[in-house]
Image (cartoon, rainbow, N blue to C red):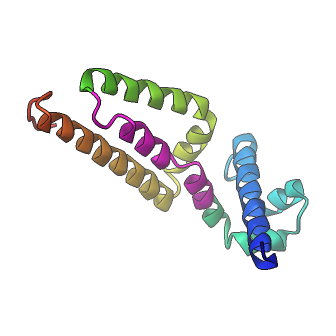
Amino acid sequence: MNVQSTRAERAEERKIQLIQLAMTLFAEEGWAGTSMRKLAQRARVSQGLIYHYFSSKEELLLQVADHYSLAPVLRSIVQAQEGKPARESLLTICRELYAHLCERRDSYWILFRETSNHPELCARLEGTRCEFTEHLDHYLRSRVQAGELKEHNT
């Protein structure tokens, strides 16, 4: 492994640590109550390093949203049901989604709470909802094609 890739990996690890710490601070203090200075102090790094990774507090919020995104979870839950009967799969999808949301309830609550003040965050979460709807639509259409479900306008 070369030195440059090791350095890049360490930088990515540091960025993820800062994102996770930011989520912790957002939970404790709220987004408005969390300053970049406070994040730097808690992380025991310089404030300049924080700005090396995130140009602004808003960008940090968006990076937090991306890191904790529901999109990959929703995608994998629905894709795991491909080819399986709807009677079982729809219940499985609901149960797994509910379990995941309960497990990360605090994280998602923080992000959902901030959507009213951050249009770009709201747009990203809306994109996740649309992506989930598309995956679910694809699954349901496959069950219609399999003759299991009747065609209908959802």
Residue 75 covered by magenta stretch: yes
Task: Name the one closer to the observer, 140 or 119.
Answer: 140
- Residue at x-position 76% and y-position 57%: 18
Which one is in front, 80 or 125?
A: 80
| Residue for point 39% across, 37% down | 80
Residue 56 appears in the figure? yes
Q: Is residue 153 left or right of residue 58?
A: left
Q: Is residue 109 left or right of residue 129?
A: right
* Chief secondary structure of the magenta portion: helix
Q: Which residues are magenta?
A: 61-84
Residue 116: image location, x then y, percent: 49, 50
Residue 105 horizontal/vertical position (percent): 58, 33
In the image, taking residue 109 as reference, residue 38 lies left or right, namely right
Q: Residue at x 70, y 41 (%)?
A: 27
Looking at the image, is 11 positioned above or below residue 67?
Answer: below
Which quarter shows the C terminus? Answer: top left
Q: Residue 45 location, x and y as percent?
A: 88, 64
